[in-house]
Image (cartoon, coloured by chain):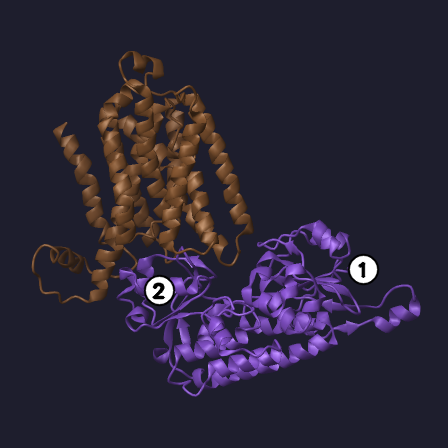
Amino acid sequence: MRAMRAVSGSAGAVVLGAILVSTAVEHSRVLSPAVSATRTITDIAGRTVLLPAVVNRVADPWHANNGMVLMLGGADKLVATTAQARKQPWFRHLYPRIDQVPAAFDEAGDVNMETLLGSRPDVVLMAYGGALPKWLAAADAYRIPVVMMPNTSLADLKTTALMTGAVLGPHEAQIAAEFVRSFDDNIRKVAARTTNLPTDQRVRVLHTATAGIFTVDGQRTVVDDWIGLAGGINAATVAGNARAVTMEQIAAWNPDVIIVGTAPNRESRNAILHDSRWRQINAVKNRRVFVNPTGVYLWDRHSAEAALQILWAAKVIHPDRFADLDVGLETKRFYARFFHHTLTDGELASIMNATAP
Amino acid sequence: VKRGRALLVAVPVALLYVSLFVGRFEVAPRDVLRILLARLFPLVRDWPASIDTIVMQIRLPRALMAVCVGAGLSISGAAYQGMFRNPLVSTDMLGVSAAAGFGAALALLLGRSAAEVQVIAFLFGLLGVTLTYFLARTYRTTPVLMLVLSGTIVAAFFSALLSGAKYVADPDAALPAITYWLLGSLNGASRQSLAMILPPIVSGTVGLLLVRWRLNLLALGDEEARSLGVRTEWLKAIVIACTTLITAAAVSVCGLVGWVGLVIPHVARMMVGPDHRVLLPVTLSIGATYLLLIDDVARTATASEIPLGILTAVLGAPFFAYLLRKTTGTWQ
C-alpha cells in the first residue's frame, strides 16, 4: 500500500514532522530494486503521506498556493491547477505557461477526477481548514498522495511555504527557507515599532472582502493577523472571512482606515468615498481609504506576497512611524529576488492599484 | 370601514417612525426626534453630524425601502394569485426572480459595482418575464396554463444559468457575494437606490390598484370574464407588466426575499376575504408592515446582518403550514 495513513496525536509532532521530511530511499532500494524510491511526510492533518523521492508533477487545487509554487521555482512542475489561479493577471504575466496547465479543480476546490488522473500528478497540495476534501478517498484509491497544509494565519503561511518546498524538492526547500527568513525579517522590522503600542494608539482598520455586496473580514483570520502586526486593531468584531454586515454597524465601528480588498478595488474605493452614507466615517473624512495591492495573488490573503502586505499595511496604518520605509523599493526587491522579475515603475503601480499589468 | 382605512395607513407609518429609533448604533431617542424635527423647523443643530447620517442616510432609506419592497411584493402576489386562480402562486411565477437572480450573479461575477448589479438584475428580470410572455402567446391569447408552463421553463433555464454562475464563481470573493445576494438584504438601501426603485414600484402598485375590481372578474376565469365584457388579454398583460416592474425592482435592490409575496396575501384574505377591491390595499399595508418588522430584526439582532430571505422564510413557513392545515388547502 503506497498511501499509508496514520493520525498523530501531538500537534507539535505534526508541524515538526511536516518540516523534517524523512527519507526512506536507501532502504527500499536495497530491499527491492524494482520499487522506485519513496519518502514520507507528515501533513498538517496528521496523516503520514508516502511521496516519490523526486517530485516532478504537482497538482495544486489551492488558488493562493500556485503563486507559492511559482515563487519557490517549482512552477514548471505544475501539471494541474485551478481556473482561478489561471485567471490571475500577474501570474499569467510572469508565467504564461499557466494557460496550458489544465484546471483539474473548480473554484470551490472540487476535483474533476479524470482531468486529475490524466495529469498523472506525483502529489496534490491542499489547504486544510479542519476538513479533508471529499474526493480524498478517490485520490487514495488511485494512489495519488495528497498533502494537507494549514491556511488560517500568518504563522501558517510560513509552515505552508516550508512544507511546499519540502514536497517539491531540495532546491525549492532552500528557496522556502530563504523566503521564511525574509518574511521573518519583515515581521521583525514591523513588530519592532508596533508591538508595544498601547491600545489607544492602535488604528482601527476595516478590511472589505467583496464588491457589490458589503462584506468584511473579521477576527481570527489572516487579515486580522496582519492588521494587528501592523499596529492596527480590526474594527470588525465579527469572526471569520467575508462576513456581511449592515451599513449602520460599520458606522458604529467607525474605522480610521478602510482597506478595500478584492476586485474591482479602485471602483469600490471610489464608491465608498462618494457615498453619502459613508461621509461621517473617520476613514472617509480623512480620506484614508486604500486599495489593497494585488500581484501574483491577492496580497491580503494566504499568499507569498503577504510578506509584502505586512510592510504595506504598516506604512498605510502608521505612515509617521514608518516614514523611512519605502514599500515600492521593497516590492521591487522582493519580485526581483523571488520572482526573478525586475518591476518597472508602471508595473509597480499596477500591483499597488490592483490592476492587470 | 373608515377606521379600517385609517389603520391601513397608520400602522405602517407608526412602525416606520419606530424603526428610526432602533439600530446597532447608539442614538438617543431624543436626538432622533430632534433630527427629524430639524427637517421641518429651524432647530439649532448641536448633535454630531455622524448621527444625522445614521438616521437620515442609513435608517430612513432602509426603512422606506422595506416598506416599498414589502408592499410591492405582497400586492403583486395577491394580484397573481387572483389572476392565476391559484393560492400557491407567488411573484416569481413567470421567472422574474430567477432571471433577475442570474443577472445579479453575472454582474457580481464580473465584479461590477452595487449600482450596476441593481440595473443589470432589473433588466434581466424584465427580460425573463418578456420571454415567458411571448413563449406563452398562442393565437393572440395567453392562456393561464401556457403562462404557468412557460414561466416554469424560463425559471428553470435561468436557475440553471445561476447555478452555473455560482459554480464558476471565485469562492473567496464572488461566491459569498452571490450567496448573500440570493438570501436577500436591504443593506444596499441608500437615497440613490431608493430613487431608482421608487418609479417602477409606485407605478406598478398604482396600476394594480386601478384594475383591482376587474381582477374579481378575471378570477372567475377567462371565458366568464370575457362574456362580462372584460378585455382579458389586455388585463392580463397589464397585471403582468405591473407585477414584473415591482418584483424586478424589488429583487434588484434587495435580492430574493421569499414568502412575502406568497404568505401576506393569504393573511389579508383571512382578514377581509377574497374581494380584490379590499384585498389589494389591505395586502399592501400588511406587506409593508411585515417586511419593515422583519428588517428591523435583521439589522439589529446581531453585528453581522441576518439575511432577509432566512428570516422571512423561518417566520413565514410555519405560518403558511398553519394556514394550510386550517383551511385544508381550500380557498375562498
Q: Residue B102, position in %: x, y?
A: 46, 44
Q: Colour of chain A?
A: purple
Identity of the residue drawn at 59% across and 77% down: A341
Crowding at label 2, few (<14), some or many (≥20) Cα neighbours within 10 Å? Answer: few
Q: Secondary structure at mark 1?
A: loop
Vertical position of residue A113 compared to residue A350: above or below: above
Camera-nearest residue between A123 and A276: A276
**Who's the residue at 25% across and 59% down the image?**
B54
Q: Nearer the viewer, mark 1 or mark 2?
A: 2
For residue A203, above or below residue A4: below
Q: Which residue is mark 2?
A: A270
Tag 1 residue = A2
Q: Chain of mark 1?
A: A
Q: Quadrant of residue A177?
A: bottom right
- The chain identifier of the residue carrying mark 2 reads A
Q: Secondary structure at mark 2?
A: helix
Direction from residue B256 to residue A274 in the image, left or right: left
Q: How many marks?
A: 2
Vertical side of A265 occupied by B210: above or below? above
Instruction: Check disc 2 and give the amino acid type.
Output: Asn
Q: The chain shown in brown is which?
A: B
